[in-house]
Every structure is written in structure tokens, then in C-alpha cells.
């Protein structure tokens, strides 16, 4: 007789990110914010808000938890000729949100820590989907599309506004911005997400990218930084490596 409690296929291990000082953070979900820097919105052909009153609502999409890469080697994905980098602040939640809509003033208490990551994008597939008015999940949620550095506890990072997010590719600076340029800051984004999802410990939020997104090729080496707080080093490998 078959055991009804038995898994019929092996259960995959959870995705984990190392935490500075020891331990690991198991990833539950990955939420991503689109067009959260005005300069990037403009370079993508979108209208940027002139003031906070003109922001409307944020744009959200998701990646699977197992899209996280911590090894440093990121395979160039299939089905694209135009892989783009997008450097982002990554927020890790260490507590569940209360039931209902999370108040902005209560949101920071959920934050466990921060790191820096890359929202890799198959830009050609995204462009085709946008032109046809179709969803562009395949351009964002593919395997190994979310490299991330080690998590740093929030207390060690302190205030974010004056911190600088940046990316170098092969020693060339491509993206850079202080975080006070975010259209929606961390508590505001958590508040908005809570209207749509039940936020839980283990969730990650990729907060959006500044201007300067561009193509990556196999062999490229990237260094993403949040000031001197944390760095992410990765290499784009060919699919066979």
C-alpha cells in the first residue's frame, strides 16, 4: 500500500543565501519592482513621475526562488541574444506581515537585511512581448536570473538614502545611483506589496534599477556594490559551463 504522506518525487532543497556573521536565509518568494528609478524609466521609454503625487502605483513582477545564484558563475541563458544587467538593492524580510494592509510606518520592522543583486533580463524577449501586449514573464523569471550577494543585517547597514548602488562590468562603471533616487522607498514598496500578497519571512524584494542597463556577453565579469557595505562578484559563463 502506498504511504499517502510520501513524496512521489524528491523534494528540492530550499534556496538559501549566506548571512554575514553566520547562518543562511531560506528564500520563500522573490518580488521585483519595475521602473523604480526615474532615469531608468525614461531610458526604457516610459514616462517618469514629476513628483510623489504623480507616482500612481508601482509595477511588480516575480521571479522563482530558485533563480537565485550565489556561486558567482551565471550561465548565459537560452533563447536570447540580448541579456541585460539591472543592478538592484535587495531587501530580505525576517518576519511575517500582519494580516491586512501593512502600514508604511510598520514596514521597516519586517526587514531582516539587505544585499545587492542583479535582475537579469532577456531584453529581446521582453521587447517582443511588450510590442504584442503579452506578459513578459519569460524575460525575467528564467533560470539563474537573480544573482545575489550575502545578506547584511539591517542594523549594520543603517539608513539607505545616502547609500550608492553601482555596477561595474569588466572594470567599467555602467550603473550608479544613490538610493534617495528611488521613486518608492522600502517601506512604501512593502506597503504596496501587502495590498496584493501576504508578505512572509523569507521573502526577497528586488527594488528596481537605475539607468545604464546594457548587454552582457559570455566571459563578462560583474561587480555590483552597495557602497562599502556589500559586493556581488559574478561571471557570465557560456551555457555549456
Image (tube, grey):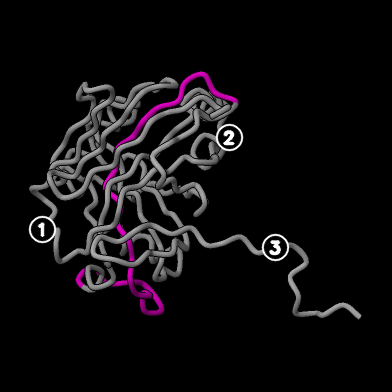
Q: Position of residue 108 (x, y in %)?
A: 22, 68
Give neighbour class at mark 2: few <14, some 14-19, many 20+ (Cα, 10 Å).
few
Question: Which residue matches tag 3?
Answer: 10
Depth order, front residue of 3/117: 3
> Is 89 part of what is drawn in magenta?
yes
Which residue range is magenta in the image? 79-105
Q: Secondary structure at mark 1?
A: loop
Which mark lies nearer to you, 2 or 3?
3
Residue 159 has which mark?
1
199 on left or right of 5: left
Q: Report, in whole angstroms, how far the alpha carbon at label 2 lies from the one at label 1.
A: 38 Å
Q: Position of residue 140 (x, y in %)?
A: 49, 39
Give neighbour class at mark 3: few <14, some 14-19, many 20+ (Cα, 10 Å).
few
Mark earlier in primary sequence (3, 1):
3
Mark earlier in primary sequence (2, 1):
2
Q: Position of residue 63 (x, y in %)?
A: 49, 48
138 on left or right of 27: right
Depth order, front residue of 144/41: 144
Q: Report, in whole angstroms, how far the alpha carbon at label 2 lies from the one at label 3.
A: 34 Å
Amino acid at each position: 500500500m502506498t504511504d499517502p504522506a510520501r513524496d512521489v518525487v524528491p523534494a528540492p532543497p530550499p534556496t538559501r543565501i549566506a548571512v554575514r556573521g553566520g547562518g543562511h536565509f531560506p528564500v520563500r518568494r522573490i518580488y521585483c519592482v519595475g521602473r523604480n528609478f526615474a532615469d531608468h524609466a525614461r531610458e526604457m521609454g516610459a514616462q517618469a513621475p514629476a513628483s510623489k503625487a504623480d507616482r500612481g502605483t508601482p509595477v511588480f513582477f516575480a521571479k522563482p526562488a530558485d533563480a537565485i545564484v550565489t556561486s558567482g558563475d551565471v550561465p548565459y541563458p537560452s533563447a536570447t541574444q540580448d541579456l541585460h544587467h539591472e543592478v538592484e538593492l535587495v531587501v530580505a524580510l525576517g518576519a511575517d506581515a500582519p494580516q491586512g494592509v501593512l502600514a508604511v510606518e510598520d514596514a521597516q520592522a519586517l526587514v531582516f537585511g539587505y544585499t545587492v543583486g542583479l535582475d537579469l533580463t532577456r531584453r529581446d524577449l521582453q521587447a517582443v512581448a511588450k510590442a504584442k501586449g503579452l506578459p513578459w514573464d519569460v524575460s525575467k523569471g528564467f533560470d539563474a536570473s537573480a544573482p545575489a550577494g550575502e545578506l547584511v543585517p539591517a542594523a549594520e547597514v543603517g539608513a539607505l538614502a545616502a547609500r550608492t548602488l553601482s555596477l561595474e562590468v569588466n572594470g567599467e562603471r555602467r550603473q550608479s545611483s544613490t538610493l534617495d533616487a528611488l521613486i518608492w522607498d522600502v517601506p512604501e514598496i512593502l506597503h504596496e506589496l501587502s495590498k496584493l500578497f501576504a508578505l512572509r519571512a523569507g521573502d526577497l524584494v528586488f527594488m528596481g534599477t537605475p539607468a545604464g542597463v546594457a548587454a552582457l556577453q559570455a566571459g563578462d565579469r560583474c561587480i555590483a556594490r552597495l557602497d562599502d557595505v556589500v559586493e556581488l562578484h559574478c561571471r557570465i559563463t557560456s551555457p555549456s559551463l
